[in-house]
Image (cartoon, rainbow, N blue to C red):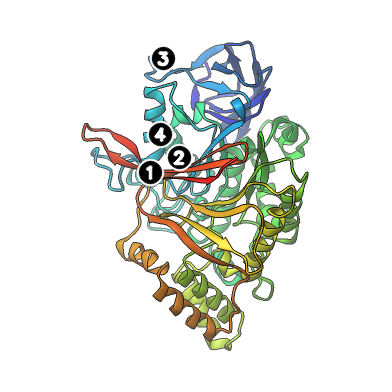
Amino acid sequence: MAALRLGPLLRYVDGSTATVWVEASRPCTAEVRCADGAHGTARTFQVAGHHYALVPVTGLTAGTTTAYEVLLDGTRVWPLPDSPFPPSVIRAGFVADTVRVAFGSCRWAAPPADGKDPVGPDALDTLAARIAADPEAVRPDVLLLLGDQVYADETSGATQRRLATRRDLKEPPGSGVADYEEYTELYYESWLDANVRWLLSTVPSCMIFDDHDVIDDWNTSAAWLADMRATDWWQERVLSGLMSYWVHQHLGNLPPAELATDPLYAAVRDTPDATDLLRTFAAEADADPTTVRWSYRRDFGRVRLLMVDSRAARVLAEGSRSMLDAGEQEWLRTEALAQPGSYDHLLIGTSLPWLLPHLVHDAEGWNAALCRGEKGERWARWGEKMRRAADLEHWSAFPESFDALAALIAEAGSGEAAPATVCVLSGDVHHAYVAEPTWPSGGPDARVLQLTCSPVHNSIPLPIKMGFRFGWSGVARFLGRRIAGHGKVPQPPIDWRCTSGPWFGNQLMTLTMNGRSARLLLEHTEQDGQGGARLTTVEESVLTTS
């Protein structure tokens, strides 16, 4: 009899359809049955001995909520027997045009061995507990996970003990994962957490990778990539990372109509074992990122989300560095400007913040100038070492891409059909803040904000925490311009300031949008004194009004 190994994850949802992702223990037919009669079935497909299904659910009624169950070969496997959680539900469409989007990044999933969590309560665990305790409480309509869903290079002690039964951890890649099978261990550790498993079964999710999904500072530079490709373990790591991301995360980002015309998805389902198919796909994607698009668009009523791949789509050659290749740039521009007036809020999800503290921004621009040879070969070699040591690889390390995004945001946010807000949603930097740009010529009609929220469950060393606090200061800003001057880095086309934060700790942001109004909520986790945890409000503000 087939058993449920992982999931279910409720992924895509609109007014009439949804997709539910599962992993089973053997080949079978997966079925989702809803209390209101909506349903769907899918046969599992096989990758490296694992069996997955993405079940398309049809017949949903917009504006309604229905409980669902999962069956494998006709046997109910979800809800779990004696589950302490309320039934998992699918909420189709949006009620009264209100859309609540919760987001964050960087979740190190290892549970504490002794019950004392060294990095504090997990924000997703805590959110799940709150929703489960009161099913009528306000919950997100969608959860955006903006990178580092798994840490392939920073594994837990328990995972390392399992890896040690397969290979010698003294040999590269050491305690990091080596292949597809080891990646599955990371997803089990992350998504079998009881609270998170239930949360992901009942709140739709959108995901995009960041560096730790493969390795810290993935695709920092051409020199970095050449060094990695010279090792005897890198190819297996990156191919397994892309394969496992496609299976566990990417498929669920896409609407059923797009999946129905995807030739790779069709081929994977039609072959007895898709391992070689996906290896070939991943090898092509690694060799030539233009062969695949990980970015995607989702519409939630009158809210448009453009989730941008700011890792794999990079152009790394020093003379033409770009955060996005030409095809990705054109895709982003086309989707942002399509059907003007059809959305009230534009959300651009990119794992890496667009607007950073001024000192960091200027240091990255200066470093980019050094690395492309503005000060000679010796400075370029030193700049490359500094780029890797200090993680100088955000949007500001790709100055032309930074400027291009600023120009696109201004264009999308201007004119009679402009949305009320354009918000760039990011994580990565293990703290939270709100930054607001201004344009010398007056800027767009929409309110533009950088909303950064990280980590969901991780920590930041005290010296880096102090550095980020200092980075927003006037002294740091003056120092940054002096550093940029050494590299003859021009002033950026916009100015910006930190309007809220920085905040540190495990946290989630939630945007609530209704019509042209928008509110922002930031919540931190804290111990509740009774052995549990709670989310507490640290910032709540009105971004726009109708």
Q: Let me know if residue 315 appears in the view.
A: yes
Q: Residue at 66% of width from left, 39% of height from top?
A: 298
Q: CA distance from mark 4 to mark 2?
A: 24 Å
Q: Pick whichever, 17 or 419, lies toward us.
A: 419
Residue 312 image-quadrant placement:
bottom right
Q: CA distance from mark 2 to mark 1?
A: 7 Å
Q: Earlier in the sequence, mark 2 or mark 1?
A: 1
- Label 1 sits on residue: 159
Q: Earlier in the sequence, mark 3 or mark 4?
A: 3
Q: CA distance from mark 2 to mark 3?
A: 24 Å
The kind of residue on which mark 2 rests is Glu
Residue 260 image-quadrant placement:
top right
Q: For numbered disc 3, what is the local secondary structure? A: loop
Rendered view: 240 above or below 487: above
Q: CA distance from mark 3 to mark 1?
A: 27 Å
Q: For numbered disc 1, what is the local secondary structure? A: helix
The kind of residue on which mark 1 rests is Thr
Q: Residue at 32% of width from left, 60% of height from top?
A: 461
Q: Earlier in the sequence, mark 1 or mark 4?
A: 4
- Label 4 sits on residue: 127
Name of the residue lying farthest toward the left: 529
Question: Are dots 3 and 1 in contact, CB under 8 Å?
Answer: no
Question: Are dots 2 and 1 in contact, CB under 8 Å?
Answer: yes
- Label 2 sits on residue: 185
Mark drawn on residue 81: 3
Q: Pick whichever, 370 or 437, lies toward us.
A: 437
The kind of residue on which mark 3 rests is Pro
